[in-house]
Image (spheres, helix red, strand yellow):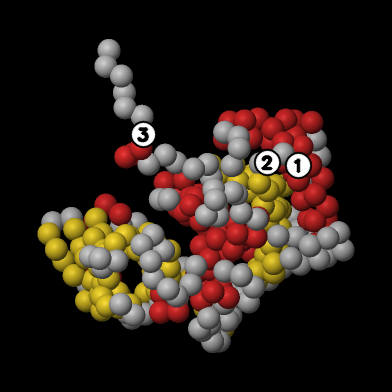
Amino acid sequence: MREITEMEIKDGSWFVHSGVTRHSYVSPGIYEARILSPIGWLTSKVRSDCRLTSSASVNMSGDDDVSFVVGRIASLKSLKFDLVVAGYREAFASLTADRIFVARSASEAATDLSMMAVRAPWRSDPIIKIAGFSDDEMLRMAIYDTVIRFEDAVERHGAWRLLYDGTGTVMHEHQHQGMYRLFSQFIFGAYGISVDPNADHGSGPTDFTLRLRGAVNVIEFKKDLKKSEIRHGLEVQLPLYMASAEALRGTYIVMCHSNSRPEVEDILSQVFAENPDLPEIDCWVIDCRPRASASKAATREAT
């Protein structure tokens, strides 16, 4: 996805926006978000039940100049867009708990948003420590949080569309990885987690190698087009990557395009049952199969 100021805007286009977002109250339970684009002000309605935190109602007031928005053009004619994800460009904006200690911070914000999801990491180097948690635990929790958000966007908010090209063909795993990296950028940046895509530690390039001081976690993405490859990735590929990177824990994410979640979970369960000596690996199964539009769904027959 590209910055809205740097792209051709069409109906249905997905975009990111890193400028000012103007919020205003409309009616009980409804707010309006406005962003300035090359074609004028675009508006979107936001329901109060979509807010994830109690502080969102305070933040959604007036002009927010540190916002980051992922959206989709709903109608050029009426200048409407669907607000899909909204957050902060600067990760520290939402970190206020007294258990968080910033030991060092040297921030140099990236300006090319397209690079955030492809290659270059966000140029921010905070060193944060949360009392009571080891680096391994913090790294695992950060990955858990980002995968949950990524899964929710794909399965319940239409982001699965970004994993298919215009002909309906499943896109390369790099597209899946790029989407995940975009979702993870804020949290990983806040904790100072180093993200190394395609890092080769001696047994081939990993999808992502994550480091938080002394903690290491290797993430492997796998499409479910071949069941044999799902097994091989968990049974052989990821453990070898982990050994080469000296990672005590790994993360295995299966993106379902052909099989149902239970079918893939059965395969993963079999691998663990047959290989009790596997290293510590957290497995995720995300349903990326296309959803039918409600307007095109079959009519129920009368009984």
Report crowding for label 1: few under 14, some 14 to 19, many 20 or more residues within 10 A (C-alpha): some
Whichever of callouts 1 and 3 sits on the residue coming sooner in the sequence is 1
Cβ atoms at labels 2 and 3 below 8 Å apart? no
Provide the residue designation for mark 2: 225
Q: Horizontally, is 259 left or right of 37 in the view?
A: right
Which amino acid, by three-letter code, is at mark 3? Ala
Residue 291 in the image: x percent, y percent?
Answer: 44, 41
Q: Work out which residue is located at the far right of the displayed protein and give it.
A: 202
Q: Which mark is residue 297?
A: 3
Residue depicted at 59% across the width and 63% down the height: 178
Which amino acid, by three-letter code, is at mark 1? Glu
Whichever of callouts 2 and 3 sits on the residue coming sooner in the sequence is 2
Provide the residue designation for mark 1: 229
The reply to whether residue 96 is visible in this rendering is no
Task: Tell me how far mark 1 sits from mark 3, CA to CA.
Answer: 33 Å
Q: Which mark is residue 128?
A: none
Which amino acid, by three-letter code, is at mark 2? Leu
Which of the two marks, 1 or 3, is nearer to us in this view?
3
Residue 251 in the image: x percent, y percent?
Answer: 67, 51
Name the image quarter holding residue 270.
top right
Residue 11 in the image: x percent, y percent?
Answer: 36, 62
Which of the two marks, 1 or 2, is nearer to us in this view?
2
